[in-house]
Image (spheres, rainbow, N blue to C red):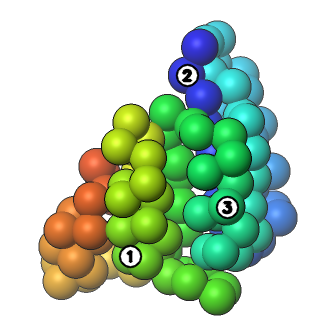
Amino acid sequence: MTRLLIADDHEVVRAGLRQILQSHPGWEIVSEAHDGKEAVLKAIETKPDVAIIDYSLPLMNGIEVTRQIRARLHGTEVLIFTMHDSDTLVEQLLNAGARGYLLKS
């Protein structure tokens, strides 16, 4: 079973992702977060295999969330889910340890 964390400050986005991801056999949503600090704390607590993180989270952006999760949880891959389309941002996220980058649009 692949364990997933979803972090987005919009409940409707989390609900949509939850609906899609839960329909996949073998995937389990182990936690959700609505801001960057909560995302890091929930990741440490639940140790997901994959953390799907919105770049524009309150309290801590996706770059810092990625750095903190990857520094503490080497087995957790981070996928950034965002509406921002920027080569510079992609480079910063990958340098912070994100495995991938997915546009919301």
Q: Position of residue 12 (x, y in %)?
A: 81, 62
Amino acid at circle 3: Leu
Amino acid at circle 2: Thr
Residue at (32, 77) in percent of width and height: 85
SS at circle 2? strand
The numbered mark at residue 41 is 3
28 on left or right of 15: left
Q: Position of residue 91 (x, y in %)?
A: 16, 73
- Foreground label between 2 and 3: 3
Q: CA distance from mark 2 to mark 3?
A: 19 Å
**In terms of image quadrants, where is residue 27?**
top right
Question: Is any atom of residue 47 visible in this view?
Answer: yes
Density class for disc 1 (Cα within 10 Å; few <14, some 14-19, many ≥20) is: many
Where 25 falls versus 23 (above or below)?
above
| Residue pointed to by mark 2 | 2
Compare residues 87 and 57 and report the one nearer the observer. Answer: 57
Q: CA distance from mark 2 to mark 1?
A: 23 Å
Where 23 falls versus 7 (above or below)?
above
**In terms of image quadrants, where is residue 2?**
top right
76 on left or right of 41: left
**In terms of image quadrants, where is residue 47?**
top right
